[in-house]
Amino acid sequence: MKAETPNSSQGKGRYEAGPEADTPELPHLAEYAVDAWQRSILYADVMRLRGNQYQTHLAERVPNVLNFPSEVVMSGKDLPRPVNYWLVRIVPPHDKPADQMKRPFVVIDPRAGHGPGIGGFKVDSEIGVVIDAGHPCYFIGFLPDPIEGQTIEDVMLAEAAFLEKVIELHPCPEGKPAVIGNCQAGWQILMTAAMRPELFGPIIVAGAPLSYWAGWRGRDPMRYTAGLLGGSWLTAMTSDMGAGRFDGAWLVQNFENLNPANTLWNKQHHLYANIDTEAPRYLDFEKYWGGYVYLNDVEMQYIVDNLFIGNRLSIAELRTSDGSRIDLRNIRSPIVVFCSYGDNITPPPQALGWITDLYGDDEDVLTHDQTIIYATHDSVGHLGIFVSGAVSRKEHHKFTTNIDLIDVLPAGIYRATIAEPAQKNGAVPLDNFELSIEPADVARVRDIVQPDPESDRRFKAVAQLSKINLGLYRQFLQPWVRHTFTPQAAQWLQAMHPLRLSYEWWSDQNPLSSHIADTATKVRKQRVAIDDDNPFLQMQEIGSQAITQALDQWRDARDSAYERAFEWIYDSPWMRTITGQTGSDEPAYTGPCTAPDHDALIQQKITELRTEIAEGGALEAGIRALIYIHRFCSSIDERRANLLLELHQPDCHRGFDMASFRDTVRRQANIMRLDEKAAIASLPQLLARDDPARIRQIADGVARIRDFGPLSTAEESSLSQMLGIFDHAVTSHALKLP
């Protein structure tokens, strides 16, 4: 056997080929180096374009990010109490004209640091869905600068005036305008609806916080901020440093602080890693994200004191300037609450907690004749609730196309789910998604919210401490701050905000930018992207993931520390003493008061319903029959539920508008709840008042329930029972003929 030597072929591979063995990595490194250099140049150029876009956007007369043409209908500046809001009509494309017989939609964007337009940011948006469905569409937006002295109440009055104008332009039979309020606009429009309920059709609030003390322990750290800062005195000082205006950039900064991994790394790295395709999407979003707006000091102080810290909206403690109470229980239109488990700005407890704050049980909901439908998403983030194209194509599309069904739902709490249809027979939705409505209750909502009385006591202490600190600030510091920060000083301070500087410093106004722009043009002509299997590119992504993980761990540790500090401070005996919480078991909230005549009104309604059991005709009988059949269903899909609307087709009941039909459905549902046995027993009396053709027409509509899948044994038995009553009524009519 030949001995191995350093000069043998095997030995050469082992001893002499070291440098050559490394050679294959050198091309990969060279490719990566060139690619990284090109990406860096292109990234810098996109950031230059971002700066240019920011300056151009701010120079617009009415900065917004609407992606649809529009025409101004009303300006809030012309109202008796002027505001910086405006109402526009969205001009639909020629191939998608609006059906003027359909109810209009009004979309309202949040004024929470950013400018307006995100509800119509792209084709797949809330506005885009409304246009596709053929509804007239309006949009309420705002200017960057508020009118001096404008208040939250002034904005509510403006929104009411805008809705009055929309109703004037669309006296359609399908009902009052449907209103979509995103985030901050959600709670504000519900306040307006509580004061002027007659102006509203169904209301959809997406990602709107309404119960500000609510949240899950170990999550939702944003609610602790005010307590750790000592209350709203800092809000007042920030407004004073802005010469009477609160800079919305600080609100955006708070949002960004919630997710440092995305703010400090992921968003920019995603652009860098996908620089060849990501620039347009990135710039579109940054146009919105960098469009900072202002609020008046009185507006921001009202929001922080009464909502964020005081939590007074969800317990009906707010009052208008004339003393009227803002009580969400006054809203007569269906309220659709859309929230997400992936939202750390408006988590489900804050979106739904107002229900458990206002209502002790289901009977309480029914006696206030309120319809609440809630829908939850498993993962989408806060902005995604009203920005995501996938959410618009699914959830918002189904809400829009089923808006008339939502409008006629009887009083109660419901859960809406949207999924692929379980079966394909019958009238399957064209988009392959189906809305299902299932009865829910206060207890089920409470399981989501998980109210914590001990936590509420802490937040009540925060509210008390905030009043003390705000009073001290106004007495000792405010005069000095207001004297120091002139309008010129405030303007300089606003310009120096870190978020604004991140846009301002790098644009065509920077002398170095022209070199980057020229180089980027050359790079695009010679761009050669490397393969995904490049080992150095893979190491880059591994490093990026490590950075993200580290920042996430730091965020979790920070949030946990915030929570522990908050609980330690506000559980301490000295804090309880300062804030007047002398008894450890003293509840923070005892429930909202009701009108003194509420019980008397309920008894009056019950008496009226009993007298109406034997009143009505074939339509009322058909509605009762469908309710009777569906009493065994745990949920009802949109195809079955829309049978109610089919009973109200123009050729079935001419001259009967949607408002009257909605009232009829709700009254028949209440009659069935009150005395189901008597309501069914009186069907022959109702049918005796209509002609045989009408009875057959309604019976055929009821029988169509079989078109949407097999019925359970109980449902089939109930259907046969109802059809038997209808057939007997037709026969009885025939026997009466001479």
Image (cartoon, rainbow, N blue to C red):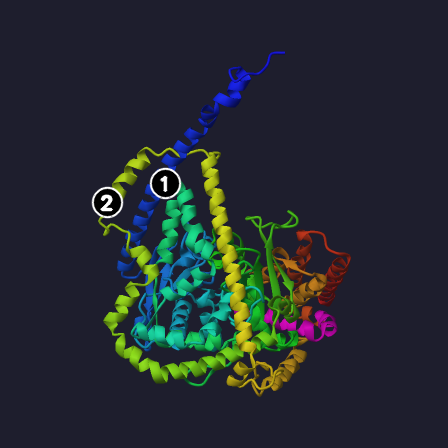
Relative depth, front residue between 375 and 674? 375
Question: Which callout, 1 or 2, points at the residue further toward the start of the chain?
Answer: 1
Amino acid type assigned to the residue bearing label 2 in the image: Ser
* Highlighted range, magenta: 655-684
Amino acid type assigned to the residue bearing label 1 in the image: Arg
Give x and y (percent) for residue 597. 58, 87
Report which residue position mark 1 lands on: 39
Image-quadrant location for residue 711: bottom right
Considering the numbered disc 2 on the image, is that residue within a helix, a strand or a loop?
helix
- Residue 514 is labelled as 2
Relative depth, front residue between 629 and 270? 270
Image-quadrant location for residue 143: bottom left
Quarter of the image for the N terminus: give it. Answer: top right
Q: Is residue 504 magenta?
A: no
Please report contact status of discs 1 and 2: CB closer than 8 Å, yes or no: no
Q: Could you tell me how far apart the alpha carbons at marks 1 and 2 are, in whole angstroms?
A: 17 Å
Q: Is residue 316 left or right of residue 414?
A: left
Relative depth, front residue between 70 and 652? 70
Classify 35 as above or below 193: above
Q: Is residue 722 left or right of residue 183?
A: right
